Amino acid sequence: MTRTWPAVAALGLAAALSAAGARAAPASAADLAARGAEGFMGDLGCSNCHFKDSNFAPALEGVAGRRIARAPGFLYSAGLKSKPGDWTDANLDAFLSNPQVFAPGTGMDASVADPGQRKAVIAYLKTLR
């Protein structure tokens, strides 16, 4: 069977759109957390300071949902201690976006500019227990 150019082009476009849709499909929670772990341990460098038994930065096990600046055994800055509430997704996102705006005087000066990467890191933090 001979196909005309418009039919071939339409098939190609349909295949391209289908492939693009497959790539754009939302990641599962596990995939998102894995991407967050990769950034946390890798290029974001979070794990350089946030590790178990660190005196430099608090360990982050159980941080998601915990009261802000309440990890046992860590001395928080006045800026963070003055923040009410819990580490919700929104608060984690705001803090990771710009820690100094969220809690002026905090010791954390690193931020995560990309919203998608922040979402992934937050998903990873939720897995830490």
Image (tube, helix red, strand yellow):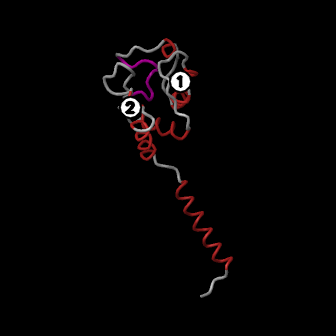
Q: Report the residue at 46% width, 36% height from top.
A: 121
User: What whole-number distance in Å separates the C-alpha atoms at marks 2 and 1?
Assistant: 17 Å
| SS class, disc 2 | helix
Mostly what secondary structure, the magenta segment? loop
Task: Return the mark for residue 51.
Answer: none
Q: Is residue 117 above or below residue 8?
A: above
Q: Quadrant of residue 21?
A: bottom right
Q: Quadrant of the C terminus?
A: top left
| SS class, disc 1 | helix
Q: Quadrant of the N terminus?
A: bottom right
Disc 1 target residue? 99
> Was residue 66 drawn as part of the magenta stretch in this picture?
yes
Disc 2 target residue? 47
Q: Position of residue 102 (x, y in %)?
A: 56, 22
Q: Nearer the viewer, residue 55 or 76?
A: 55
> Was residue 109 drawn as part of the magenta stretch in this picture?
no
Q: Nearer the viewer, residue 125 or 52?
A: 52
The answer to which of marks 2 and 1 sits earlier in the sequence is 2
Q: Position of residue 117 (x, y in %)?
A: 51, 39
The residue segment tinted magenta is 62-72
Q: Position of residue 64 (x, y in %)?
A: 44, 29
Q: Report the residue at 43% width, 47% height from top.
A: 31
Q: Is residue 118 above or below residue 26?
A: above
Label 2 amino acid? Ser
